[in-house]
Image (tube, helix red, strand yellow):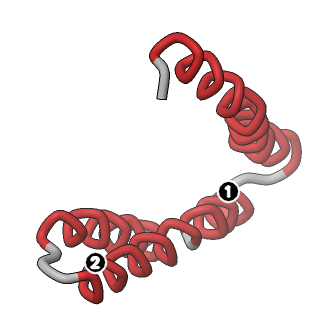
Amino acid sequence: MLCPILIREACLLGRRCRFLADNICFYLVCRIIAGVSGSLMIPAVFGNISGSYQGRQQAIDFGAPGAASGFSFAMGPVLCGVLLDTLGW
């Protein structure tokens, strides 16, 4: 249970550091920290679900993040297109 908390804190640290960056190298290091720690969140969440639930409840709990990801992948470009058409570039 400690691993997702540490990953989340690393992700937040990377995001906060970007605003304090005074040169491009430090900014890129902060982006890398945020990106790597953010990409580790999904396996950590699925690992917790896999270890915590069994049977039908596990299937339900795996389906919820999957449905949310699918919906956001489908609606993200549509929403961006609507915003760009109405507000302009």
Q: Amino acid at mark 2?
A: Tyr
Which percent across, then down, holds residue 5? 38, 67
Neighbour tally class for label 2: few under 14, some 14-19, many 20 plus, Cα within 10 Å: some
Closer to the chain start, of discs 1 and 2, is: 2
Q: Quick one: 55 or 2, which is closer to the camera? A: 2
Residue for point 34% across, 85% down: 29
Does residue 65 appear left or right of residue 22 in this picture?
right
Q: Which mark is residue 27?
A: 2
SS at mark 2 in the image: helix
Q: Is residue 7 left or right of residue 82?
A: left
Q: Residue lying farthest top?
A: 86
Q: Is residue 32 left or right of residue 23?
A: right
From mark 1 to mark 2, how far is it between C-alphas? 34 Å
Q: Are marks 1 and 2 in contact (CB under 8 Å)?
A: no
Residue 23's place in the image compared with 17, above or below, is below
Q: Position of residue 10 (x, y in %)?
A: 33, 74
Most foreground residue, 56 or 64: 64
Residue 55 percent coordinates (x, y): 87, 48
- 70 w.r.t. 2: above or below: above
Give the answer, above or below, for where 54 lies relative to 7.
Answer: above
Please tell me which residue is depicted at 78% across the width and 37% down the height of the picture: 70
Quickly name the residue at label 1. 49
Crowding around mark 1 (Cα neighbors within 10 Å: few <14, some 14 to 19, many 20+) is some
Image x and y of residue 83, in percent: 53, 19
Q: Secondary structure at mark 1?
A: helix
Q: Work out whether residue 78 or residue 55 is closer to the camera in this orientation and state it.
A: 78
The residue located at (12%, 70%) in the rendering is: 20
Which residue type carries mark 1? Ile
> In the image, which disc is placed on residue 31?
none
Q: Residue at x 39, y 79 (%)?
A: 33
